[in-house]
Amino acid sequence: MSTTDINDKYVRFINVKKSYDQKALVVKDFSLDIRKGEFVTLLGPSGSGKTTCLMMLAGFEDVTSGTIQINGQSVQDVAPYHRNIGMVFQHYALFPHMTIAENLAYPLKVRKLPAGEVKQKVQDALALVELEAFGGRYPGQLSGGQKQRVALARSLIFEPSIVLMDEPLGALDKNLREHMQYEIKRLHEQLGFTAIYVTHDQTEALTMSDRIAVFNDGVVQQCAPPAALYETPANSFVADFIGENNHINGKVEANDGKVAEISLSHGDRVRATDINCPPVGEPCILAVRPENLFIAAPGREYDNVISAKFITRLYVGDAIRYFFEMSDGAELMVKMLNDQDAPILEPGSQTRLTWATDRGLALDKPTGKNTVKAA
């Protein structure tokens, strides 16, 4: 394998399965290649298998079957402390009886580095996370954000090639979490390590990642850059899990391979882009994101128009969310900027809603089966 191939497949999960009881699989046939220096997020609901994959890569959990490779070499028989992997946990895992400097020095002393080199690396690590004046303090004297920066510095201090992060910002408030997202991305770009990040927060994943692997029930549903996941989800689960979406039940009436014609329960016939559309005659889901669904202007003609009853609107500062109900009881939401063009509607009034054909997606109905799509 050439150097280019190894860099493109620096971390490899090859048909990896994991069972704790030798009966039920927590991770089902997981395969993923991660490039050297890439920031990949494993995203999914609780219990979907993402943390288990992280723990198997770290060496804290055994692989039931399949192979995990780093830099072209299998690591199944390599002890965790020999894998050159840094770890960051949600709850910091700092030693409370040690100062910040001592916490940072610990992984270096375990590796038996000379005292002078340890001291210099600790100073450099504190500077890296802008905590130069905090080396003599104890974890209990730091804020949550400062503790997480120390935990991040400790994971980087021995210059690992890979850094694994398991819900590292889950214990922080919104503003601090957003600041730490920036800090982690800054360090990743500055140092160039390979990052594998676990979260159930979709906004966090979209903000930070080069690629996102969306998990459900132990299987990756889709792995792609954030924009691709958001704009062209592989199936209805990804469409529903990534961002907000309006889901409308329909039946496929025609399909030319690019655009599907869909009949809705109340009789309207509309068009949408074929993403993962069932065959003609089968039920499907029409998905339209709230920012792509519009209130139709009177007297104008549109490709796609449906009628819905206005229920209420929700003011959220920079945007207004309008809630509607279709005749079959399906709920829809339109998101618009809060500006002078934002309409005032009477509750109970019938309103026409519209979308561009390329902004509506024709998708499979959820069946419990899994679709894998990588990019």
Image (cartoon, grey):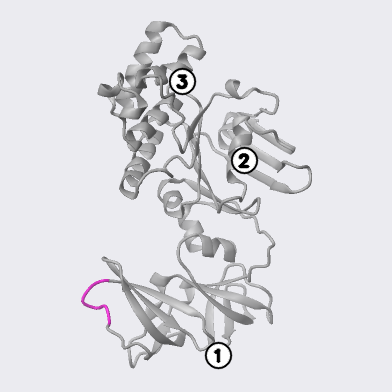
Residue, disc 2: 53
Decide: few, some or many residues near mark 3? Use Cα within 10 Å; few <14, some 14-19, many ≥20: many
**Residue at 58 percent of width and 82 percent of height:** 262
- Percent x, y for residue 249? 58, 79
Q: Amino acid at mark 1?
A: His
Find the distance from the CA under tag 1 to the CA under tag 2: 45 Å
Question: Which amino acid, mark 3?
Answer: Phe
Alpha carbons under labels 3 and 1: distance apart: 63 Å
Q: Earlier in the sequence, mark 1 or mark 2?
A: 2
The residue closer to the viewer here, 151 or 164, is 151
Residue 113 position, x and y percent, is 46, 9
Q: CA distance from mark 3 to mark 2?
A: 23 Å
Query: What residue do we see at 50% from left, 9% from top?
Result: 112
The image quadrant of residue 84 is top right
How many discs appear? 3
The residue at which mark 1 appears reads as 266
**Left or right placement of residue 179 versus residue 333 in this view:** left
Q: Which disc is residue 158 wearing?
A: 3
Give the mark nearest the N terminus, 3 or 2.
2
Please provide the residue range marked out in magenta. 338-343
> Which disc, if any, is residue 333?
none
